[in-house]
Amino acid sequence: MIAVVPHAEIKTFMKESAQKPGVYKTLYFVLAGLAGMGIGGLISYSLVVWIGGGSPATAVQVGAGIAFGLSVLIIIHEWIHGIAYKAFGAKNVYYGGNVRQFVFYAASDGDVLKGRQFRIIALAPFLVVTVACLCLMVGMPQYGAALSTVLCLHTLFCGGDFLFVHFLSQHDIDRLRTHDDRAKAESYFYYTD
C-alpha cells in the first residue's frame, strides 16, 4: 500500500504531495500563476472601464464568468471525471464534497483502475474545459471576457487534479493501481505484481 487517502483529508494529502518536486506540480503552478494574473487583469480592466464611464458589459461578463465558475462549472468538472471513469469501465461512480473546504470529487466504489487510466481521469476536466473555452472564444468572441474568466478560474480549481497526477508520477505508474471505498470514504493507491 502506497497511500490511503480519506476523502475528508484530500487537501492534507495534496499539501504533502506538493512537498516533492516534479513536472506536473511545476506545470500546474505556472498555469495557476498565469490564470491568477489573467483573472486579476480581467477584473481590474473591467472595473477601470466601468468606473471610468465606459460600458459595464465587460464587468458583467467577468461577474457572470465568476458566478458560473463557482457553481455550474464545479458540477460540469466532476461530471467530466465521472464520464472518464465510465470510459475506463467503472460501474460505481459517485460524487462527493465538502463545501466548507471547497473540495469536490468524483470516485468509483470498488472499481480498480490502473495508474495511467487514473492520470487521464484526473486531467480530463482540465483538458475538456480548456479546449471548450478556447473553441468558444474563437466562435463567440463577443463573450471573450466571460469565457476567459471561466478558463482562468477553472485552471485555478484544477490544483487537486494536477497534484494527484504529480503524486502518481512519483511512482511506477505501470504497476500502480487505485480504487475507492465509498462506505469508508477512502481512496487507495498500491502496487500490483
Image: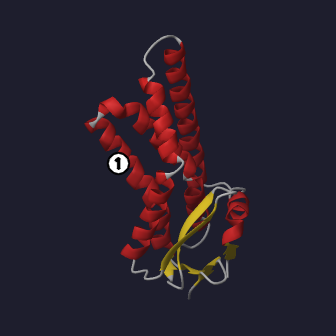
**Residue 118, image x and y in percent?**
49, 71
Q: Determine which quarter of the picture holds residue 136.
A: top left
The chosen color scheme is secondary structure
Q: Does residue 67 lie above or below 98 as drawn?
A: above
Q: Does residue 119 lie above or below 18 as drawn?
A: below
Q: Does residue 136 lie above or below 9 as drawn?
A: above
Residue that protrudes farthest toward the left in the picture:
139
> For mark 1, what is the residue?
132
**Residue 62, image x and y in percent?**
48, 33
Report crowding for label 1: few under 14, some 14 to 19, many 20 or more residues within 10 A (C-alpha): few
Depth check, front residue: 161 or 60: 60
**If the image is split into quadrants, where does the N terminus sit?**
bottom right
Please state which amino acid type lies under the numbered disc 1.
Answer: Ala
Q: Determine which quarter of the picture holds residue 15.
A: bottom right
Q: Residue at x 46, y 30 (%)?
A: 60
Q: Residue at x 67, y 60 (%)?
A: 14
Q: Residue at x 58, y 67 (%)?
A: 168
Locate residue 114 relative to residue 189 in the image: left or right.
left
Residue that protrudes farthest toward the top in the picture:
53
Q: Does residue 76 lie above or below 145 as drawn?
A: below
Q: Determine which quarter of the picture holds residue 135.
A: top left
Q: Secondary structure at mark 1?
A: helix
Q: How many marks?
A: 1
Locate residue 45 relative to residue 127 in the image: left or right.
right
Q: Residue at x 47, y 52 (%)?
A: 73
Depth check, front residue: 121 or 100: 100
**Residue 23, image x and y in percent?**
57, 53
Depth check, front residue: 78 or 170: 78
**If the image is split into quadrants, where does the C terminus sit?**
bottom right
**Residue 188, image x and y in percent?**
63, 79
Residue that protrudes farthest toward the bottom in the picture:
193
